[in-house]
Amino acid sequence: MSTEPRQSSGKPLTRKGQQTRQRIVAAAAQLMYERGLTEATLEDVRAAAGVSGSQIYHYFADKQALLLAVIDYQTQGVLERQAPLFCRLDTLEGLRRWRDALVELQKRLQCRGGCPIGSLGSEVAENNPEARLAVASGFVRWEAAIRAGLTAMHARGELDGDPDDLALATLAALQGGLLLTQLQRQVRPLEVALDAMLDHIEAHVPRPV
Amino acid sequence: MSTEPRQSSGKPLTRKGQQTRQRIVAAAAQLMYERGLTEATLEDVRAAAGVSGSQIYHYFADKQALLLAVIDYQTQGVLERQAPLFCRLDTLEGLRRWRDALVELQKRLQCRGGCPIGSLGSEVAENNPEARLAVASGFVRWEAAIRAGLTAMHARGELDGDPDDLALATLAALQGGLLLTQLQRQVRPLEVALDAMLDHIEAHVPRPV
């Protein structure tokens, strides 16, 4: 999904330009995460990033271009933060550790913000097809990371369910758990949703007879 | 949650007034569902409901008051549409029928719109505490309807898991499945998420020994 960032004119960026662009995207991502997409204006982003209005337009033709960059940035962020755990998702113990880390993160955030990708997705799903597809493709990458672990278990004969279905159901449980946790400002929905899914996966682990 | 609707001045409504108010809320709900909360302006609502601007303010002091009425309206709608199925959620067969009805509805909607309550919740969660609490309380009612069925199964000795946890996990699976279905415009995430949860519940049904 990530392509080399460019100026809105299409010219390649210098290294300093890349840093400025990244600062704008990070500021926009934070504001959209805290306030919601439409409450975060370009003027807010400009002030938060400490750049001029013309600098923003130097990098982004319009708010849509900035939004697509934010979706990519948030997807990268989610995947990179979880990467050390993803490579362990091929054991029940690794899956439980991943669950614990997701729950701990929500506790640290006081259950604010929900999923950085899912909440953007919900806001754009009915009014911005290009952004909807960008979010959907972010979720495809996330699902693939979960599926990789379950597929490895399956290949080793340690899982007798369908790894594709189980991965998608796990991502759904995670998303629904995060939304309810965000709304209730308590971590229980996320815990209960993930525990149910991981118990379900565990039930598909063949036991020695 | 529902209290007797009144004029924004606090006076009770006549029957005709109640109908006009209901028409405004229904139009606002539809627009917010189709376009997202912030894209649906009071002017759009006014035009869609076929009323004057002063009529809207006669019933709603501001957009916030209208939004709270929409959250209540959507919660009522979801609960009423599912009510005939809720009373069957105390058997596995009833749970599977409910799952089928939810999937069929998404097919009819071409997977557009997501959950009418959940998508509002995602939009208000970080910038509107009063609306966030209203959505959270709508979900509490939904969860209670699912829990009632599972609690009845448990009381009859037909479920050996915790009905509270299973109900919350089922609602989370449903919400996450709906979000991914909405983003991907295909019904598979919802199907797979609910099937995993119902299989999990089925695994908690004691078998005759």
Image (spheres, coloured by chain):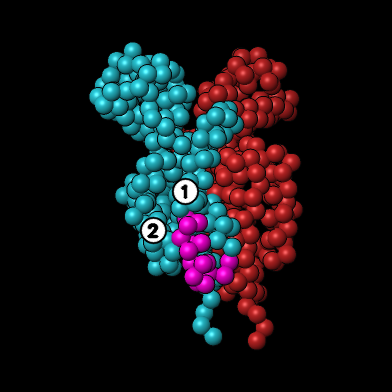
Chain colours: A cyan, B red
Q: Residue at x 55, y 61 (%)?
A: A163
Residue furthest out toward the front: A12
Is residue A172 covered in magenta? no
Give the extent of the magenta segment: A146-161
**Subunit that carries the residue with mark 1:** A
> Which quadrant of the view contains residue B160?
bottom right
* Label placed on residue A103: none
* Label 1 secondary element: helix
The residue indicated by pointer 2 is A87
Query: Where B137 sits versus A96, above or below?
Result: above
Residue marked by disc 1: A142
Q: Is residue A191 above or below residue B205?
A: above
x and y percentages locating residue A84 in the rendered image: 34, 55
Which of B206 and B151 lies nearest the eye of the viewer?
B206
User: Which is nearer the eye, A7 or B106?
Assistant: A7
Separation of marks 1 and 2 at Cα, in angstroms = 13 Å
